[in-house]
Image (cartoon, rainbow, N blue to C red):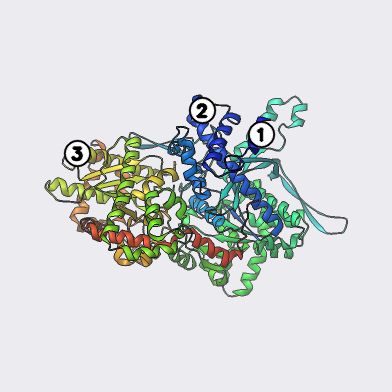
Amino acid sequence: MTKHNNTTKPGGNGESIRTGMSEEAIRLAFLDNLFYVQGRFLEVASLDDKYKALAYTVRDRLLHRWVSTIRTYQQANPRTVCYLSAEYLPGPFMGLNLLNMGIEEPTRKALQSLGIDLESLIAYEQEPGLGNGGLGRLAACFMDSLATLQIPATSYGIRYEFGIFQQDIRNGEQVETTDNWLHYGNPWEVRRPQISYDVKIGGHTEHYTNEQGLHRVRWVPHETFRGVAIDTPILGHDVNTVNLMRLWRAEAAEALDFHAFNEGDYYGAVLREVRSETISKVLYPNDAPEIGKRLRLLQQHFFVTCSLQDMMRVHRTTGMPIERFHEKFTVQLNDTHPAIAVAELMRLLLDNHHLDWDTAWHVTRHTFAYTNHTLLPEALEKWPIPLFQSLLPRHLEIIYEINSRFLDEVRQRYPFDPDRAQRLSIIDETLPRHVRMAHLACIGSFAINGVAELHSQLLKETVLRDFYELWPEKFQNKTNGVTPRRFMLLSNPGLGSLLNETLGHGWETDLEQLRGLEAHADDPAFQERWRQVKRQRKEALAGEVHKLCGIDITPTSLYDVQVKRIHEYKRQHLNLLHIITLYNRIKRNPALDIVPRTFIFGGKSAPGYAMAKLIIRLINAVAEMVNRDRDVAGRLKVVFLPNFSVKLGQWVYPAADISQQISTAGKEASGTGNMKFSMNGALTIGTLDGANVEIREDVGAENFFLFGLDADAVSHTLANGYRPWDYYNANQELKDVIDLIASGFFAHGDRSLFQPLVDHLLQHDSYLLLADYADYIACQDQVSAAYRDPQRWTRMSILNVARIGKFSSDRTIAEYCRDIWKVQPVPVKLD
Ligand SMILES: *Cc1c(COP(=O)(O)O)cnc(C)c1O
């Protein structure tokens, strides 16, 4: 009773404490949740209790907006975006929800009045690591922008029980431990046990003729389990729109297998339940040459079928006929991970709704759009036919039928080019035969897009060239973006305040307004404040570095940062070649006057990717030698931040002076880290790769440190017998660096430890480090020269922020809405 009374008790000015936005309402709500949800009073509450009490306080207010959103959507029956992604990296929720709801200040004060520091609760939150890196983070930025732009949208995925592994560094090596993010519970999610769907696997199909003489197919699965919805509300900025992230958790079809139970097989029944749950148990790390395949394909099918069945349930409530499914929903495939959806939607339409093939195919081809994220051939998904057959026999039949009809079309189009049908086929006929998921996605989608201009262009010229020639009208570009709410306002409050003061509010949701900064780029007083903001973030990061690594770094040094997944194409080892070059220069000439630098690395390697793990070892080995060498003290420092994540990124991006975006040209589809750095006033040293090209175009070539071969030169160099030895022999500094690594200098004299890395560089160097080395070093020397001139540097920094507007994910999403999804905003009024 007390609870109910409290709920409606006015919180100061007649507000309900469940929904009120005043300091008083929030304070009462916090105490109420602490007492009635956590069962604690203030004096004995732990940090976890306080965090949860605040999270529930925020969640109540989210749910209020969510209900209003659902009501609005029910009345308007709007066209809806469904984003299918196997990964989401949303980052911690508390800070962003407070910010988007506009109650950061009253909340801070309410807690202060109780002797609690809001920052400590925000810092306590563990983030859901349901993604590997850029692709999952992109999906999260898109959710933020969809809600902010008031677009009806649901993001579907998998609620992994264990997300991306936690990375420890022990003796300089990456050690993986499980990410038990649900251990203390997750206050942001709402379980929906009544929203659940059957998921079939294995078995066989039966073809028969029904009473009306129509051909029908029945899939008799080997096993059935269930997917249960778990929802997380996603609030837009300064609006009432709350969209859902709906993730699926696998459960046994029935809590216990009663048949087995009746036979006395109690343990067998329980074990089956445990086995079902393994489907959503763990996220697969990517970037590995090979991964455990069976479970991965099961995961894809699992979340895709639950999501499509969920859309069909919603569609039924609209009263529209199933033939118009594609008018209600537009479904974006985030890479090929959900591409099985093409066959699954066909199956549901044919076998459950009994549509004829042509109608079902019409609906399917007007439902999906596909985003490609990679040009690396080893990353294009394909599944061995026997595996596919054993798990998804009905889907394989449907894929064969789609393929056969498609290839008829191809042969008719190109009667004198039999190879073309082979190249376009969904089935890779080279033994062992495989299903090519990118081909299924292209054939089943009405739009195909890359994620930066260069990437979209290369797609048309290389991996998807035949599809482009067939259907040029399907191809588009949608250059990625990131949300300025999380990556500017939330992680860089000092910058946020300075921008508000200078430009007024509005830039947060209309990033082009940052152009107004150009007028201040040469104003000495403004420049000084700009430097103070950066200095303050550098000090804050120094504090974190000390906490995490026990290393002291100097905020007056140039922070030179590379944080991203560790991969040979991203070339963290090229960065190392530069560090060792500087080290050698100082050792040769101890009086050398150089700009003091702190090199900061962070990023995870796929557990099975030996070369990436060796690069991590070399970074830590170089750090060990450099950091304890008194000859270079005060001039060089190297830090490897363990367990890079969104949360850690929020400390890192705003503190950087230089952002390293140095991938081999043509390999990085877009990159989004590059945008986060630039938005926070870091200057970029980078190649003409991915979105770097467009960032440089917008911020101006004179405000960007460009080096290296472009994508064309890279392919020519590799095609014309590239000889890394020639570069080694021709450049004394390069030779010294490689020789030093090979000598065992960084491995306590052990010449074998880094030999695989040295051998690869000298013999193959497939990512052209040696070819780009000299230009990279010269460019880094220019960076140092520019940094010696604070006025010049600050001007460049201001202009980077002023001209970065295009890279807001709001712009990206507006383009998807206009060119692909054809959806309109549906504003939500609060009930
Ligand atoms: C932005 C982001 C990435 C992507 O970084 P790139 O530099 O584009 O590879 C990866 N991981 C996290 C945690 C991020 O926030």
Q: Badge 3: few (under 14), some or many (20 or more) residues near its Cα, within 10 Å? A: some
Q: Separation of disc 2 and disc 3 at Cα? A: 50 Å
Q: Separation of disc 1 and disc 2 at Cα? A: 21 Å
For the residue labelled by badge 2, is the local secondary structure a helix, a strand or a loop?
A: helix
User: Along the line of sight, which residue is nearer the eye, 414 or 481?
Assistant: 481
Residue 186 coordinates in the image, percent (x, y):
56, 37
Identity, as a three-letter code, of the amino acid under mark 1? Asn
Q: Quadrant of residue 341?
A: bottom right
Residue 536 coordinates in the image, percent (x, y):
32, 46
User: Along the line of sight, which residue is nearer the eye, 418 or 674?
Assistant: 674
Residue 48 coordinates in the image, percent (x, y):
50, 31
Q: Quadrant of the N terminus?
A: top right
Please name which of the two marks, 2 or 3, marks the residue nearer to the observer.
2
Q: Separation of disc 3 and disc 1 at Cα? A: 67 Å
Residue 230 coordinates in the image, percent (x, y):
62, 42
Q: Name the residue at 46% across, 40% down.
A: 108
Mark 2, residue position? 42
Identity, as a three-letter code, of the amino acid under mark 2? Leu
Mark 1, residue position? 5
Please name which of the two marks, 3 or 1, marks the residue nearer to the observer.
1
Identity, as a three-letter code, of the amino acid under mark 3? Asp
Marks 3/1 in contact by CB < 8 Å: the verdict is: no
Marked residue nearer the N-terminal end (3 or 1):
1
For the residue labelled by badge 1, is the local secondary structure a helix, a strand or a loop?
A: helix
User: Along the line of sight, which residue is nearer the eye, 721 or 53?
Assistant: 53
Q: Is residue 744 visible?
A: no
Marked residue nearer the N-terminal end (2 or 3):
2
Marks 2/3 in contact by CB < 8 Å: the verdict is: no
Mark 3, residue position? 629
Q: Quadrant of residue 255?
A: top right
Vertical order, 4 against 733 (above or below):
above
Please name which of the two marks, 1 or 2, marks the residue nearer to the observer.
1
